[in-house]
Amino acid sequence: MVKAIIFDCFGVLITDALAGMVAEVRKLRPEVADEIVAIVGLASKGLVARQESSEKIAGLLGISTPEYIDRVKNGEAKNQPLLDYIAELRGKYKTGMLSNISIGGLAARFDVGELDKYFDAVVASGDIGYAKPEAQAYEIVADRLSVRLDQCVFIDDREDYCEGAKGVGMKAILYESFEQMERELDQLIR
């Protein structure tokens, strides 16, 4: 029986501007794209500060740090229909967010208290030192929701992160669109 529904942030709740930049760089300079991904991975585990990672990524992209930060900010948009749906779900299920993000990254994107309207637990990888698809990340969010892993549905736009969730016993939905996710979730929670 499903008791909790856990959502990813980037590519699900917010458009992933950085992923788009990395995809563009990968076309011409795959080694630079790999370096950016490595820096993001370190920042996601809290091993590199957000400002330092922004500076390094901006340098690899050949732009100033303020320009990089501006491109990320302007390239991100909240998925308000999904957030509204999560608010509805919250009446029947525990809701959570599990995001691979640097320390302070969520505070830069959401107003104080905003996430409290939608989620019973919010877990940022940079705060816990584990990032998806590491088992500990999923275990921590389930623990904070006070549910067993097999009582959770995890929703992410990355297959490897969905596989990580399945590996610890969660059900998972690969997010492709709001409509597709809603349909698949409805089938799981009926």
Image (cartoon, grey):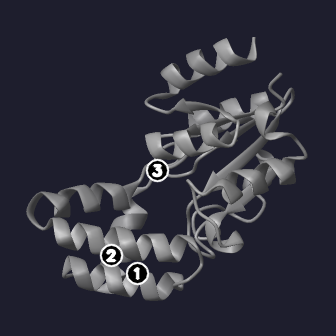
Q: Are marks 2 and 1 in contact (CB under 8 Å)?
A: yes
Residue occupied by mark 3: 77
Q: Is residue 112 above or below residue 138?
A: below
Residue 158 shows in the view: no
Q: Specify whether residue 186 is in view.
A: yes
Q: Is residue 143 or residue 51 the one in the foreground? A: 143
Q: How many neighbours does mark 1 have within 10 angstroms: few (below 14), some (14-19), or many (20 or more)?
A: many
Q: Position of residue 110 (x, y in %)?
A: 64, 61
Taking 147 as reference, is 32 left or right? Answer: left
For marks 2 and 1, give the CA distance: 7 Å
Question: Would you name the residue on which mark 2 appears?
Answer: 68
Q: Quadrant of residue 47?
A: bottom right
What's the residue type where badge 3 is placed? Answer: Ala
Quadrant of the snapshot with the C terminus: top right
Q: Nearer the viewer, mark 1 or mark 3?
A: 1
Residue at image location 60% in from the left, 34% down from the top: 82
Percent x, y of residue 22: 27, 61
Residue at the image point whose x is 51% and y is 81% from the top: 50
Q: Is residue 41 above or below residue 81?
A: below
**Residue at screen point 70% across, 59% down:** 136
Query: Which dot marks residue 130?
Result: none
User: Which amino acid does the dot numbered 2 rest on?
Assistant: Tyr
Cα–Cα gap, marks 1 and 3: 19 Å
Q: Secondary structure at mark 2?
A: helix
| Residue that mark 1 sits on | 54
The tag earlier along the polypeptide, 1 or 3, is 1
